[in-house]
Image (spheres, rainbow, N blue to C red):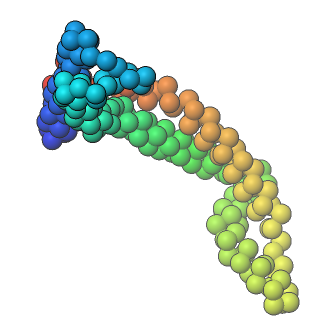
Amino acid sequence: MVTSSEKSDFKTVSVKLVEAIENIEKAEKIGDKEGLARNKDGSFALRGNRGKEVQGFINTNLSVKNKYLPIYQNLKSLPQERWLKFRKVYTRFYSFLISSVAWLITTGILISKEFSDFSYGVNAIIRFPVDLVKMLFSARTGAKYENPDTLLQWKVLLISAGICLVIYLIVLFASRASAKKVSPIPPEVNMDNLNKY
């Protein structure tokens, strides 16, 4: 889940970030030990050379920390972000697959109930887009077009589409749990588990 380049970046960024944080802490301790005056915001006063020196060192390391902290946070959460993308694709795929099968079954059942001849019913459903275009075109041009199967076509397609949508949503939410079983969410990256990725 983490490429070798990302591992290398994580190591580099981690080292620089830890070094900057340690430098800030050391400088804070030195300034306190030497009794340097502090401003209201907690920074060391710049009245004396030593205060300027210590605060300058802290500011340099703060800019390093501010530069690398967002990169570090992004890299440590990469496996989880990729897992969430996987879950999204996985759940949508299975929801679509199962709802498509449900649509076919529902449509087949409705065709057998609504049409006396099953093959004629299948043809009526297949030709629905053409019938719809002809009906819209005839309404626009004033020509007369009659389709005796219009109501049955709409009934079959709307009912099967509604059932398909409900099943899609149910499977979408239910498959999130199975995604965790197929592939558990990985922990955040740290220096201890970096080589496991």
What residue sits 70% from the left and 69% below the top?
A: 128
Q: In this view, does 9 lie above or below 185?
A: below
Image spot of residue 84 (x, y percent): 42, 35
Q: Residue furthest front?
A: 47
197 to the left or right of 130: left
With 169 as the anchor, is 152 left or right in this view? right
User: At 31% from the left edge and 25% from the top edge, which residue is drawn?
Assistant: 45
Extreme-top residue of the structure? 33
Residues 124 and 180: in front is 180
Residue 91 in sight: yes
Q: Which residue is drawn at 41% across and 40% down?
A: 85
- Nearest to the observer: residue 177 or residue 125: 177
Q: In this view, does 124 lie above or below 182?
A: below
Identify which residue, 3 or 191, lies in the foreground: 191
Residue 18 location, x and y as percent?
A: 20, 24
Res. 130 image quadrant:
bottom right
Residue 65 visible in rendering: no
Horizontal side of 156 relative to 69 (left or right) equals right
Q: Is residue 70 above or below residue 47?
A: below
Q: In which quarter of the image is the C terminus?
A: top left
Q: How many marks?
A: 0
Residue drawn 77% across and 79% down?
Answer: 136
Residue 14 x/y as whole percent: 20, 28
As rendered, which of 14 and 92 lies closer to the eye? 14
- Assign the N terminus to one quadrant of the image: top left
In the rendered view, tell whether residue 85 sits above or below residue 186: below
Quadrant of the rendered structure where residue 5 is?
Answer: top left
